Image: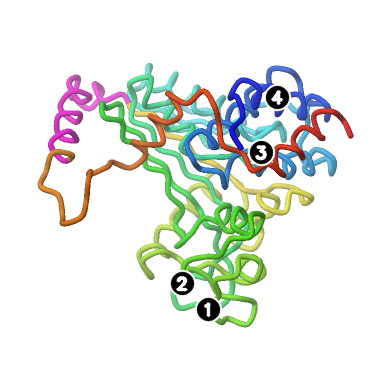
Amino acid sequence: MEVDRQRAVATAAAAFERHGISEADAELTAEVLVSADARGKHSHGLLRLPRFVRGIEHGNVDPDGTIELVADRGAAATLSGGSRPGPVVAVDAATRAMDRADEYGVGVVGVRDTNHLGMLGYYTDLVRSEGYVGVALTNTEPAMPPYGGAEPVLGTNPIAVGLPTTPPFNLDMSTSAIARGSVLHAKENGGSLPEGVALDADGEPTTDPAAALEGTIRPFGGPKGSGLAVAVEVLAGGLVGAAMGTDVTGTYHTEDACTKGDLFFAVDPAALGSPDFASTASAFLADLKDADRAAGVDEIRLPGERSVERDRDRHVVDVDADRWQEVQRLADGD
């Protein structure tokens, strides 16, 4: 069903406020979730709201948590999120990264003691829209084995990259063959998975999302996706003093304390001697889009191009009818 965007944000915010989140934090968290639905990324949209609420109810999201600097040296810093809502802490970290880029040319801000932040590309889009190059990493609960392994010890560990270009470039991808949120979305909506992306608890290939959630998700591209997942695990987790591997909890099962980490980069192109970077990169991307197309292809699209434009232009969002009823129920306090 289609829901007016402003109504969706207001209703989601009311649900968070009902559970003790401040008005400002509730509105920001709601906007991040609804933005995902506007972009067609329903796996990280209002589908996630009940899990946020569950985290609040189990004491793993602290409405009164304080965001504090725990490391601070020049262009680099690490924050303790005080268990505030993940999107609130992530926006704070991305903003601080941009502030440091203004002073040092680059800003790098790590985060620990936080929780699920929603769609990672939201934050690189925020950074790139301010004229910086943005990179974001986060690790998640174990869901896939390393290449050649059988046990899930790595998260789906997304990485996002945003460029300050027109047309927009805002890559947002998991290092797994399919995002765990997409598996959850398929399960919640009675869908099935593509072949070859997941194994059940017995290690057998499955297209059943419920079986996949009990089993493992495969890395994309075999050793390539596995290698990136390991890199994100160590950089977003270990480098900022957060957990890695099987010690990561609370990103999917929000009734558990969240132990993952995040890492945000902002780069001022002028600091690298490229004051015209936005225009030259934009021209390059435009040339890419104008290149000869393969048979049957109507358009060459850039990563995130369509989702960014949808988010900017859409005044209504598509929401599953049962999910919308649940959001309304949580907003009404039932």
Q: Position of residue 156 (x, y in %)?
A: 52, 57
| Front-most of residues 311 and 16 | 311
The reply to whether the magenta stretch includes residue 316 is no
Secondary structure beneath disc 1? Answer: loop
The reply to whether the magenta stretch includes residue 287 is yes
Pointer 2 residue: 195
Colouring rule applied to residues: rainbow
Pointer 3 residue: 114
Which quadrant would residue 20 be assigned to in this image?
Answer: top right
Which amino acid lies under the numbered mark 3 shown in the image of this protein? Thr
The earlier-in-sequence mark between 4 and 3 is: 4
Which of the numbered marks, if any, corresponds to residue 84? none
In the image, is 138 to the left or to the right of 106? right
- Estimate the spatial distance between the alpha carbons at disc 1 and disc 3, rounded to whole Å: 34 Å
Secondary structure beneath disc 4? Answer: helix
Residue 244 vertical placement versus 305 (above, below): below
Which amino acid lies under the numbered mark 4 shown in the image of this protein? Ala
- Estimate the spatial distance between the alpha carbons at disc 4 and disc 3, rounded to whole Å: 16 Å
Pointer 4 residue: 26
Residue 26 vertical placement versus 116 (above, below): above
